[in-house]
Amino acid sequence: MVRIERVLAPNPGPFTGPGTNTWVVSVEGEAIVIDPGPRISSHERAITEMLTGQRTVAVVVTHGHEDHAPLANSLAAGLSVPTYGYGPAPDFDPDVRLVEGSEIKVGGKALQVLSTPGHSDDHLCFRLDRVLFSGDHIIGGSSVMVEDLGSYLDSLRKLAPLDLERIYPGHGEEIAEPKKTIDWYIAHRLRRETEILAAMAAGASSVAEIVEVVYAEVDSSLHPLAAVSVAAHLRKLEEAGPE
Ligand SMILES: [Zn+2]
């Protein structure tokens, strides 16, 4: 039997929503921690408490951003287990480097690694049976910041045919309709592309000017993230043209 429990990190904010979701996945008495989050001692205690009575086998990270990875190495050291991730990040150094197709064993099952760059170069998703742990590739309740749009769309299109029944994201609530949500994410990016082209046709000539027009309805505290996504759209338009 698989049990999935959330430990919500106390780091709410405009970029993190209610905070980072740390997922504890338990199978037959063994446990894996996915995305320990920021280095906050009360959060580390809450995770350790959740692990009580189980044999923890791994601490796993979806990507190196500061709201997902920094607690990984110290948590794993305290539990005497290895860390797994794509590669070194400013606040993270995995013991085991993961690539597409890697597997992490837990209680007789295998967590399968999917390479999903786009939100960040180093982004991974993890699949266990029909469940996906999506980090910041897909989150609950909104779109995400995109660093590389071409890769991001490829990573979404790679997930679309999977027969998933649930997504556990890095922020926000669980996603009960994976296919519908993935399709929305793809459509949303293509809609933004159309809006960006329209804004440029109407005279917007810099990232900041495009953000003002296209993200007019989005709270201005999120405009710095929107600027990263707009820049990614412009690079993709220049390199590969419109969809
Ligand atoms: Zn991130």
Image: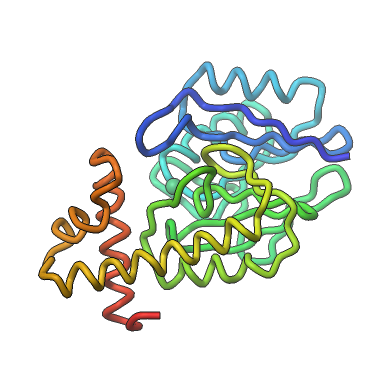
The residue positioned 48% from the left and 31% from the top of the image is: 19
Instruction: Assign the N terminus to one quadrant of the image.
Output: top right
Q: Please provide percent x and percent y for residue 181.
A: 58, 56
Vertical placement of residue 160 versus 84, above or below:
below
Q: Is 61 or 154 nearer to us in this picture?
A: 154
Quarter-of-image position of residue 213: bottom left
Q: Nearer the viewer, residue 141 or 16?
A: 141
How many marks on residues?
0
Q: Position of residue 68 (x, y in %)?
A: 49, 40
Instruction: State left or right for residue 80 relative to residue 88.
Output: right
Q: Where in the figure is residue 62, as x and y percent of width and height?
A: 55, 49
User: Is 171 on the left or on the right of 96, as rendered?
Assistant: left
Front residue of 147 and 122: 147
Taking the spot 23% from the left edge, 50% from the top edge, the residue there is: 216
State the residue at coordinates (28%, 47%): 217
For residue 39, above or below residue 231:
above
Quadrant of the rendering where the C terminus is positioned: bottom left
Please tell me which residue is depicted at 74% across the width and 36% down the height of the picture: 4
Residue 187 x %, y %? 48, 66
State the scheme by which the image is colored.
rainbow
State left or right for residue 44 relative to residue 231: right
